[in-house]
Amino acid sequence: MEKIVLPEIKDLHILDVYIKNGGFEAAKKAFSQSTDDIIDQVKKSGLRGRGGAAFSAGLKWSFMPKATDKPKYLCINGDESEPGSFKDRQVFEFNPHQLIEGTLITCYAIGAKTAYIYIRGEYHKWIKLMQKALDDEYAAGFIGEKMKEKFGTEFYCDIYIHKGAGAYICGEESSLMNSLEGKRGYPRVKPPFPAQNGLWGCPTTINNVETIANVPPIISKGWEWFSKIGEPKHPGTLLFGISGHVNKPGVYELPTGTLLTDLIYNYAGGVPGNKKILCVIPGGSSMPPLRGDQIEGVKMDAESLKAAGSAIGTGGVMVMDEDTDLVKVLARIAHFYHHESCGQCTPCREGTGWLEKILKRILAGKGSSNDLDLLITVANQIEGNTICALGEAAAWPVKFMVDRFRDYFEQRVGKEINLPVANKVHSMRHTATPLAEIKN
Ligand SMILES: Cc1cc2nc3c(=O)[nH]c(=O)nc-3n(C[C@H](O)[C@H](O)[C@H](O)COP(=O)(O)O)c2cc1C
């Protein structure tokens, strides 16, 4: 099986080994072509973003204005704070030079002279590893002004690591830019989009680590080659991070369209004790969970998961066996999003707190059937009513888990206590009254 981002080559993180294995051939090839050609090849390859939304990378690059006297920037998003996601750190550790080469090519294509690799603050080890890779490349002349000599081009760029401070919201692209600017990590209203008004008001492209690490092989082996791997509408491989109740948790690079059951049973070694699967979250904790009896035949790519009622997200697969306490899981997820809500938008700031409170009440055995409707009502009030998608990230797991496991949740709530809230209540103001009575 072809590995594009994490090839099985010993010591590939060492610059000499990377060079001996064809490192920088793609950059040399790219720098001899026009920037439009590079963007066109990435577009035709079908490469889609690996940070969650699966947006076309080439199309995003094409949004960068050409006629501007402002500096342009590239941000590589390595915040990786979504629970269940732990794939970008594999790139930092095992193939950092391919990420850097992808960064050089992307900077060239979009006309940026500065790139920032934003890495979550908790990733001490990976920040150090990535910094070492950058230092080695600077010393060898692959980054910075010495690039002119090394590659014989007029083009050169600089790359810096920026450490996050442990906030999930800073993975959201506009918060990431505010954070980089030294401001509070609040999301910005869009439009204007980063390509028009990004870092310090200048044109900016933001891409995930894995997205950019795919770029050198696309240039060296050709867009046709890439476009034929995996699912035609979402080609290439994905770094699937699989965790929870599997015998061999870890990161598996597999073609898009791999069956979810193959990933669980063949690659991750199945479920300990051969227990049944109760629930799978296929793309990181913010994605709609699937019931165990829904996963047969489900392929792991953006289109197939959408058709199955979920989303590919970051490809972080969380498997829960039949003995899992789903209320506990959901309460924990709700706690995370409540804790990580930046507080800027009222529906998210208040709603995430309510979701957590209601779930904790159910967990304490004090819930009612009405609470299940209330959870869905509150989730619906958050979804679509916030500046950034943290709202959806908080609402989706609750809404879909309660809906898809209604019987399970009904069993966990006591007799109906007839709160004056029902599923027909749609306004925040109304739902606030009974919630104010909830005391934990
Ligand atoms: C709350 C929130 C957190 C996010 N965290 C990350 C993250 O840690 N890493 C990431 O690449 N994208 C994250 N994203 C998505 C980014 O906003 C952005 O879409 C992505 O970095 C674009 O890269 P891509 O097109 O290569 O996928 C997050 C989005 C939201 C709403």
Image (cartoon, rainbow, N blue to C red):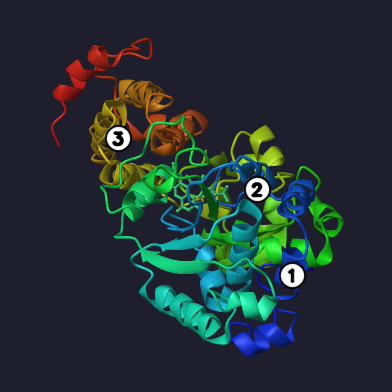
Is residue 373 positioned above or below 71 on the image?
above
159 or 265: nearer the eye? 159
Left or right of 359 on screen, residue 266: right
Please tell me which of labels 2 and 1 falls first in the chain: 1
Quarter holding residue 190 = top left
Closer to viewer: mark 1 or mark 3: 1
The residue at the point 43 percent across, 25 percent down is 384
In the drawing, what numbered circle is on residue 352? Answer: 3
Ligand 1 contact, mark 2 (Cβ < 8 Å): yes
Camera-side residue: 414 or 321?
Answer: 321
* Residue 299 shows in this picture: yes
The 10 Å Cα crowd at callout 3, few under 14, some 14 to 19, many 20 or more, is many
Q: Which mark is residue 57?
A: 2
The numbered dot on residue 26 is 1
Q: Position of residue 365 (x, y in %)?
A: 25, 37
Whole-angstrom CA distance, mark 3 to mark 2, is: 32 Å
Label 2 crowding class (10 Å Cα cut-off): few <14, some 14-19, many 20+? many
In-front residue for pair 156/432: 156
Please report the residue visible at 43 percent of the width from the left and 52 percent of the height from the top: 82
Q: Residues within 10 Å of mark 1 (few under 14, many from 20)?
A: many
Residue 269 can be seen in this image: no
Looking at the rendered structure, which numbered label has been put on residue 298? none
Q: Secondary structure at mark 3?
A: helix
Which x, y percent locates residue 276?
58, 52
Q: In the shown orientation, is residue 358 left or right of residue 265?
A: left
